[in-house]
Image: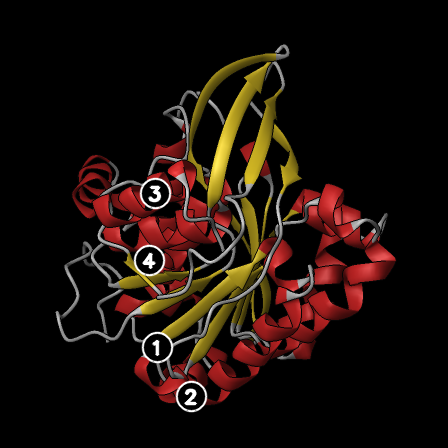
């Protein structure tokens, strides 16, 4: 097992890939009704790019068009050494997400898209499946996502980020059952406090986390923007408060995805994800075994928000932060 106090080192080249299943689209960044830029995005694609930048192989399975924007997605994935599952380019046209920035740089979204799922690789060929956002709730693709999660829960490990998109999910009552179905099948669940508030109203975050952990995950995390995150392990009754990295925020586009990529990278390095054995180890893990992964998540998300757009930090950038602040090791 990885020493929890060691700096991150590159994983073995024989490592099976992480499959990120969900949207890959084009983000149009808007502030004060003015288009600032247009670039490739989508939560699961951002996670895939983050994972490869941290030294792990990753695939994206999505649904975009064989058009100019679709080719931009393919170029972006290739640049980040993310493998593309064949058939991901079969949509009639590439999806668009309009990201509206408020004065503090926080993004809210509306979408133009259709969601479906290509034929996926065998679960036995994968180390881990990550999914989330509307991929898990928007038909016709959502049923296929649930089926993939069920297969992977037997063969390896699963992570899930509900990543609520009200414009596509319509109401909490419509999607909560599906969200909790996937929570129950997952090993790691990461949500934001805004996700929890939309899904559960005034129910305290801590109560929702304890509800989720009883459903089956080994680790549940709720991020809280500038206030860091709460984390809860199935094998430890105490909740951990995770402080954020102290950086000047450019914008928050991709912050949660970068947190997830750093977290998954750290857990893979610690052998707490990636196999049925890892699944069992995560469920009995204590904080000393997952602290390094949590710190890596804090560092990657902090580096992302310090730059405009969904920037995916490299492993050497994480190491430089650790060199400056050994307490994050």
Query: Residue 298 at what x, y percent from top left?
Result: 41, 44
Q: Earlier in the sequence, mark 3 or mark 4?
A: 3
Can see residue 322?
yes
Q: Earlier in the sequence, mark 2 or mark 4?
A: 2
Spatial CA distance of label 3 from label 4 is 37 Å
Spatial CA distance of label 1 from label 4 is 17 Å
Q: Where 198 sits versus 10, above or below?
A: above
Which dot, 3 or 2, sits closer to the camera? 3
Q: Which residue: 35% across, 65% down?
A: 85
Q: Earlier in the sequence, mark 3 or mark 1?
A: 3
Q: Secondary structure at mark 4?
A: helix
Q: Secondary structure at mark 1?
A: loop
Q: Which residue: 54% across, 43% down?
A: 95
Q: Quadrant of residue 160?
A: bottom right
Q: Quadrant of residue 206?
A: bottom right
Q: Residue under circle 4?
A: 292
Q: Residue under circle 3?
A: 71
Q: Residues within 10 Å of mark 2 (few under 14, many from 20)?
A: many
Q: Nearer the viewer, residue 165 or 222?
A: 165
């Amino acid at each position: 097992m990885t020493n929890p106090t060691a700096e991150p080192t590159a994983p073995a080249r024989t490592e099976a890939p992480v499959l990120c299943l969900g949207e890959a689209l084009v983000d149009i960044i808007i502030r004060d009704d003015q288009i600032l830029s247009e670039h490739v995005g989508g939560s699961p694609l951002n996670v895939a790019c983050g994972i490869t930048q941290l030294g792990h192989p990753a695939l994206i399975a999505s649904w975009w068009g064989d058009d100019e924007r679709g080719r931009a997605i393919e170029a972006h994935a290739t640049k980040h050494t993310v493998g593309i599952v064949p058939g991901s380019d079969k949509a009639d046209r590439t999806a668009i997400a309009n990201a509206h920035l408020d004065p503090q740089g926080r993004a809210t979204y509306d979408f133009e898209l259709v969601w479906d799922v290509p034929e996926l690789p065998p679960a036995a060929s994968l180390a881990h499946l990550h999914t989330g956002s509307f991929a898990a709730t928007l038909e016709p693709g959502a049923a296929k996502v649930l089926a993939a999660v069920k297969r992977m829960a037997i063969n390896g490990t699963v992570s899930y980020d509900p990543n609520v998109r009200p414009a596509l999910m319509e109401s909490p009552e419509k999607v909560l059952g599906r969200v909790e179905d996937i929570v129950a099948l997952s090993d790691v669940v990461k949500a934001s406090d805004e996700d929890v508030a939309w899904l559960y109203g005034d129910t305290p975050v801590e109560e929702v986390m304890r509800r989720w952990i009883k459903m089956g995950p080994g680790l549940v995390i709720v991020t809280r923007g500038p206030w860091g995150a709460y984390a809860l392990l199935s094998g430890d009754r105490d909740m951990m408060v995770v402080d954020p990295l102290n950086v000047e925020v450019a914008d928050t586009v991709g912050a949660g995805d970068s947190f997830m990529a750093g977290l998954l990278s750290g857990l893979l390095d610690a052998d707490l994800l990636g196999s049925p054995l890892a699944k069992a180890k995560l469920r009995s893990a204590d904080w000393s075994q997952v602290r390094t992964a949590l710190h890596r998540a804090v560092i990657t998300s902090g580096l992302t928000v310090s730059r405009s757009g969904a920037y995916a930090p490299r492993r050497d950038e994480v190491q430089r932060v650790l060199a400056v602040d050994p307490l994050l090791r």
